[in-house]
Amino acid sequence: MQINNFLSFKHKEIVLHILFWILYFIYPIIKFGDRESFGYDFSDNLIAMLFLSISIYTTYFLFNKFFKNKLYFFIALGVLKLSVLLNCLTLIYIDDCHCDLQICYITKFVEYIFVNIFFITILIFKKNVLNQQALQKSEQERINAELNGLKAQVNPHFLFNTLNMLYANAIAKDKGLPDRILQLSDNLHYMLHEGNKNNVNINQELKFIKDYINLQNARTGKKNDVKFISSIDNFNQQIPPLLLIPFIENAFKYSNMTKGKQLPILINIKLLNKTLLLTVENVFDP
């Protein structure tokens, strides 16, 4: 996505440059074309555009180096002055324009400065956009790394503990074993296939959490008294998969480290106006 945005921006930049030069080339026709004495010299305008473009693109491509070495600034300034001088000399001595060299130079120099500022503004805007895109990409990579780290913590512990529970129940010939195997299968399928996606429906995440709670209750017996509450105003709301489970897993983990039975665990999930709130409470004294 970032590459596509970059290419799109580069294309827009190229189009903007092309539009500028087209407008610059036909500007005399737009401004003076309705006058009877108007004459348009194609070669003169082409030469003027050539000298101006040399100055502009020298500055444009050396601008980033101005802040590292002042020499590049003076090179660009020298090219600008030389381009203005050659443009004026072309007008006066080759095209027989009856202009004063000093006045011509000052006029053209001001014109070159303003056009250079215009292109530098485009360059600064371009740098800001690309920097913003780079920051967004870096932040997204950081978030993805954190989420992947959480997923990596959840999956092995959950699978290991649940399989131990199924093994113990299988020995005892528990009648509820087939349902718990199916729930484990569904949870593993969710973690393997949905867990790698950027987003899932919150309804899918809730089903995963409910199955997880059922498996934990089966594993711990009467150790915990779990109260699960959910209040969702949009079941199609997209959220990152496995976003909530680390907090719920910790509630069981630390409750199991506490002595006693029927230890309360409260899990409350609310989604209202695209705002997701998770509350997890348990009894634990570190």
Image (spheres, helix red, strand yellow):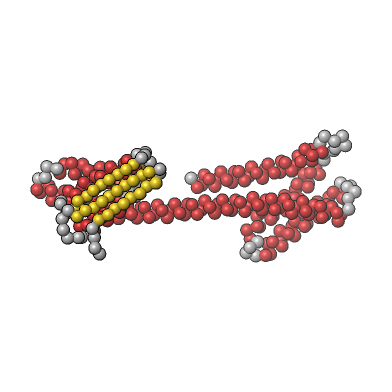
Q: Is residue 233 left or right of residue 49?
A: left
Point out residue 130 in the picture as x, y percentages from the top left corner: 55, 51
Viewer-closest of 60 and 271: 271
Residue 188 visible to the viewer: no
The residue at 53%/45% (across/down) is 5
The image quarter in which residue 40 lies:
top right
Image quadrant in which you'd find residue 201 = top left
Percent position (x, y) of residue 28?
79, 41
128 left or right of 101 in image: left
Q: Quadrant of the C terminus?
A: bottom left
- Report the number of numbered marks: 0
State the residue in front, 109 or 238.
238
Residue 164, given in percent of the width and then of the height, sits at 17, 52
Judge left or right: residue 42 versus residue 145: right
Q: Is residue 49 visible?
A: yes
Residue ranking furthest to the right: 98
Position of 20 relative to 280 (above/below): above
Residue 272 at x, y percent in the picture: 38, 43
Give me the residue at 30% from left, 44% from top. Answer: 230
Residue at (76, 41) in percent of width and height: 27
Asked whether 216 or 271 is in front, the reply is 271
